[in-house]
Amino acid sequence: MQKSIPIITIEQLNSCDKNILMKVDIRRLEDHMRTLSSADFPHRHDFYNLIYIKKGSGTHDIDFKRYLVEPNQMFFMNDGQVHEWDLSPDTIGYTLFFKKEFYEVIEKGLSLQALPFFNNGTNNAPMVVFSEENGQKIEQLFEDMIFEFKANLPHRDTLIKSLLKMILIHSIRVYQPYFKGDSTELSVSKIRSFELLIEKHFKELKSVKEFADKLNITANYLNAICTKTVGRTAGELIRDRVILEAKRLLLHSTISVCEMAYYLGYDDCSYFIRVFKKEVGSTPEQFRLINRP
């Protein structure tokens, strides 16, 4: 399968020798913007990314959703999302890159999987906006992180992990998840587990029952908690993830529609086209022609 979505690594951003591996990098956003050109976008990462906007404006597109950029705003991206931005020249802030293995915590509630803004779920927004007061706290944490990174003193990474953890705690405190209805903690936990399973198995599993079996619950119960908690059925959440990947490939690769259908787990290309058209309102080829520059 031919792909053209570039995957950028931390090592590439630092022009490292091929034998050097990096797990974390921190820099000022304005410096980072100067190292990138329009040819570098859109792209994926092989790392997690925090982007904090201290000042500036523009737009930031993450997986076909456009967000208006404003001061005191933090964007969170996982290691599979496709993004591009159009930022004003006066934009300043910070950007942090880290590999999944760099961030390890004991608290389950602070794991990368548990933090909603890192998930691809339909009801999770990948950003927060801080108050002026909280924004100043976040900026100081980034400044401390930059100092530690450049000083390269003993136990540097341990201290940077602690600062990252503090940033994520401040972020989760102000984050407003888009859950609907009276969601119980158990239901939300099941939804999180379901979303993680979708991310891992959306290419090979398509039925609600297959996912429900892995969660040790019935398909009816899974549908019920999805509908109550996020306002969409389990089947819709599964299809949402498949369609998202299809859109990524249509716009950022030269793969044929039928090759893409087989890659996404559909043996019948015509059936996949019907599914796509029902969800999007156009055929895959029409979507590619209309949206591709």
Image (tube, helix red, strand yellow):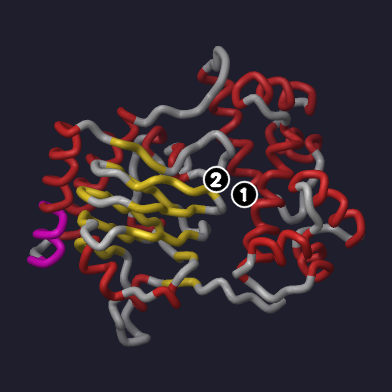
The location of residue 71, given as percent across then percent down, is: 25, 43
Which numbered disc covers residue 120? 2
Name the side, left or right, on which 204 lies relative to 31: right
Percent coordinates x, y for residue 282 in the rendering = 79, 53
Q: Are marks 1 and 2 in contact (CB under 8 Å)?
A: yes
Q: Type of residue at label 1?
A: Glu
Image position of 35 (left or right of 111)? left
User: Which residue is the site of mark 1?
Assistant: 199
Q: Nearer the viewer, mark 1 or mark 2?
A: 2
The chief SS type of the magenta part is: helix
Residue at figure coordinates x 84%, y 58% from the top left: 266
Determine the residue positioned at 74% across, 26% down: 223
Q: Earlier in the sequence, mark 1 or mark 2?
A: 2
Query: Residue 79: x and y, percent?
Result: 47, 58
Q: Residue at x 37, y 86 (%)?
A: 18
Q: Would you call the spot at circle 1 few (<14 residues within 10 Å), some (14-19), or many (20 or more)?
A: some
Q: Which labelled disc corresponds to residue 261?
A: none
Give the secondary structure at mark 1: helix
Stretch of the chain drawn in magenta:
144-152
